[in-house]
Image: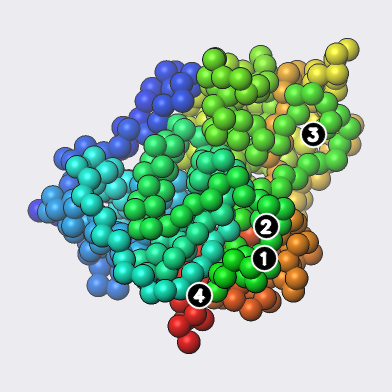
Amino acid sequence: MPNMSLKKNEMPVQNPEVRNSNFNEVALGYTEEQAIDEAKRCLNCKNKPCTNGCPVKIYIPEFISQVAEGNFEEAYKIISKSSSLPAVCGRVCPQETQCEAKCVRGIKGEPVAIGRLERFVADWHNAQPETPVEKPVSNGHKVAVIGSGPSGLACASDLAKKGYDVTIFEALHVAGGVLSYGIPEFRLPKSIVQKEIDGLKALGVKIETNTIIGKTISVDELINDEGFESIFIGSGAGLPRFMNIKGENLNGVYSANEFLTRINLMKAYKSDNSTPVQAGRKAVVVGGGNVAMDAARCAKRMGADVYIVYRRTENELPARAEEVEHAKEEGIIFKFLTNPVEIKSNEKGWVKSIVCQQMELSEPDASGRAKPVPIPDAFIEIEADSVIMSIGTSPNPLIKSTTEGLDTQKWGGIIADENGLTSKEGVYAGGDAVTGAATVILAMGAGKTAAAAMDKYIQK
């Protein structure tokens, strides 16, 4: 029988008062019974609007109908036709603005919990005994992928399945890109990322870590000296932005990227780890996106009382509603209409406090959001031991500066067409390196699009 409930099955989660002091995963996942019950809410619409809302075009009603019948492995096979990272996407993709936003059930109630079902299917599959992966027959062609984040992994996966000899070059010592260094363990366990990477290796993909393209070796050298026939640049946007206010160079001021990398990739949260990170008694996070939420929630787990300061109101927060709700539940304090103007130091050169100007909203700016303007002579000062800046990132200019004929935008993004082709023949790009910071699933979609274009380019 169909389930005509207007509400999704609730996701089991850790108690907020418990989870805000540990790094274990917050969401616990559906049981088989919950997954089947939720899947029965799907109307299996003829026009499949949810699939049109998915950047990688997962066959959503088809996989959900298999879940409803208890055929979880068949559901996994359907998802895997389109997505190489289902356990990741089921956790971190903003389904509420993509597939679920198109769900017909959402017109008179809550949409089907597509993301939660994708996560359930992937987790169920991963819990079964492993079956040997059949390595594709080589087609004799050699390609390179720069960056092992979501766009690079998706591109490498699609090309490897077509028989290409694929090598991924990763600057850090661990593969995964933002999935490893940026997203906290409590949202995306690193064991899941590693399992996805192990799956790629089983397909024959080689991963060269500690390789900085533009320094260790250049794009031109990969083509001219190493014999790669085509290259995909998925190097992300890891260059942090700052506000250029007084005191930003003090000890205790971090970019969110540095703070999260130390915690997520270098395990600074472990008491016996040698990687230092200073959260202190009180931490202030500047910004309102998902990265700001991640940084704030990590600082909370490090033992700090945490404030998020944001220059607009809660209505304009760019972060996912679920992440904001979780942050509030965990005791993080939001200061809206508040914009930093100075960071003050103590006598030892460490952060002592942050001075913020209070704001009000005016007409919308170029982004379409209400523009914040200062209220004259209205300031507050917040005591802090650390300040974490999370106001955006841009692509590292190293690849552009060492690659002949690669055009970029003024802000640093690589210029690429709808297929990912750059101004340099045989070189493609996608994900945050092209668009600036965006979502995992959009980056994956760009990687898949580029892989198809690279295949056509080489096989022409």
Residue 134 visible in the current orientation: yes
Between discs 2 and 3, the one toward the N terminus: 2
**Residue of label 3:** 340
**Residue of label 4:** 454
Q: Amino acid at mark 3?
A: Pro
Q: In the rendering, at what x and y percent does residue 67 appear? A: 19, 52
Report the residue at 54% width, 64% height from top. Answer: 144
Q: In the rendering, at what x and y percent does residue 225 appear? A: 64, 68
Q: Amino acid at mark 1?
A: Glu
421 horizontally vs 214: left or right: left
Between discs 4 and 2, the one toward the N terminus: 2
313 horizontally vs 139: left or right: right
Mark 1 and 4 residues: CB-CB less than 8 Å, in contact? no
Structural distance between the alpha carbons of marks 1 and 3: 44 Å
Please give the count of numbered marks on the rendered protein.
4
Label 2's element?
A: loop
Mark 1 and 2 residues: CB-CB less than 8 Å, in contact? yes
Between 293 and 102, the residue placed more toward the observer is 293
Q: Amino acid at mark 4?
A: Met
Structural distance between the alpha carbons of marks 1 and 2: 6 Å
Between 398 and 4, the residue placed more toward the observer is 398
Q: Is residue 24 shown above or below 92? A: above
Residue 446 visible in the current orientation: no
For residue 217, the mark is 2
Structural distance between the alpha carbons of marks 4 and 2: 21 Å
Which circle, 1 or 4, is nearer the viewer? 1
134 horizontally vs 260: left or right: left
Which circle, 2 or 3, is nearer the viewer? 2
Q: Residues within 10 Å of mark 1 (few under 14, many from 20)?
A: some
Label 3's element?
A: strand
Structural distance between the alpha carbons of marks 1 and 4: 19 Å
